[in-house]
Image (spheres, rainbow, N blue to C red):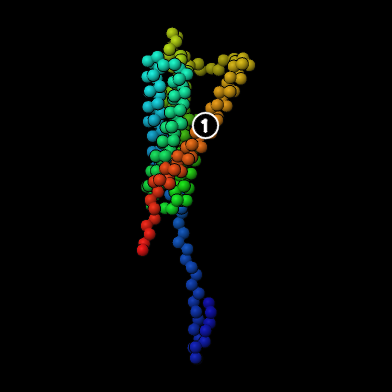
Amino acid sequence: MGVEPIGDRVIERAVVNPVVDYHDRVRWGPIIAGIVISIAAQLLLSALGAAIGLTAGATGAEAGTVGIGVGIWAIISLFISLFLGGWICANSCGPMNKNTALLHGLILWATTIAVSSWLLASGVSGTFGVVAANAGEVVNQAQQSGGVSLPNQVPNVSPTDAQNIAENSAKIAWSFLFGSLLGLVASMVGASVGARKPRVRV
């Protein structure tokens, strides 16, 4: 506050502090909406892939071919579902710039991965997830005379079997990493496409 004498009077100048218009950049309502859409789309697309895979197996397709096809479809369905979730998340928000849209897409992807992992760990994923993940083995056993057998206990394995299990586990881990990164790209692209641009007043 400054003081300025004018004649016999002294006028004090008021110092006005700038007011910052603060608000959160992240809106959890649209993010939750995007998560719901993403998980619902993933379940429907997984069900579609499992149905097509089992139908192909019933018509005589090879188990290995069915397994590869379902695996590829799982990555494609993840890409589609996260793209839709990112688009819904950004489009249901107010106008935002590109960086804010990408931030929402990133948070949507991370939250969806966390929720999906929890659902899988809790056994809430249901039959479609189990069938889609093991479609090749299910079709292979179904084509045999003994039918499908799902053992409850892990049998004793030989060193060769243990090596095969380790190789398969490594493939699953790399596939999960690759699919997750593709999902991140899909989520951020969907958010960027769905973002409504701020209006420019002339």
Looking at the picture, tell me which residue is in the foreground, 17 or 192. 192
Q: Position of residue 79 (x, y in %)?
A: 44, 35
Q: Mark 1: few, some, or many residues within 10 Å (few <14, many ≥20)?
A: few
Residue drawn at point x = 55 percent, y = 26 percent: 171
Residue 31 visible from this viewpoint: no
Q: Position of residue 52 (x, y in %)?
A: 38, 23
Asked where in the image residue 35 lies, by quadrant, the reply is: top left
Residue 72 visible from this viewpoint: yes
Q: Position of residue 202 (x, y in %)?
A: 36, 63
Looking at the picture, tell me which residue is in the foreground, 118 or 45. 45
Farthest residue to the top: give it: 145
Farthest residue to the bottom: give it: 8
Q: Position of residue 141 (x, y in %)?
A: 46, 14
Reply above or below: 101 against 35.
Answer: below
Q: Which structural element holds mark 1?
A: helix
Q: How many circles with numbers are drawn on the protein?
A: 1
Farthest residue to the right: give it: 159
Looking at the picture, tell me which residue is in the foreground, 28 or 85. 85
- Which amino acid type is shown beneath numbered disc 1? Phe
Residue drawn at point x = 46 percent, y = 31 percent: 75
Reply above or below: 77 against 165.
Answer: below
Residue drawn at point x = 46 percent, y = 53 percent: 25
Asked where in the image residue 139 lies, by quadrant, the reply is: top left
Reply above or below: 26 against 9.
Answer: above
Tag 1 residue: 176
Looking at the picture, tell me which residue is in the foreground, 80 or 20. 80
Residue drawn at point x = 48 percent, y = 48 percent: 103
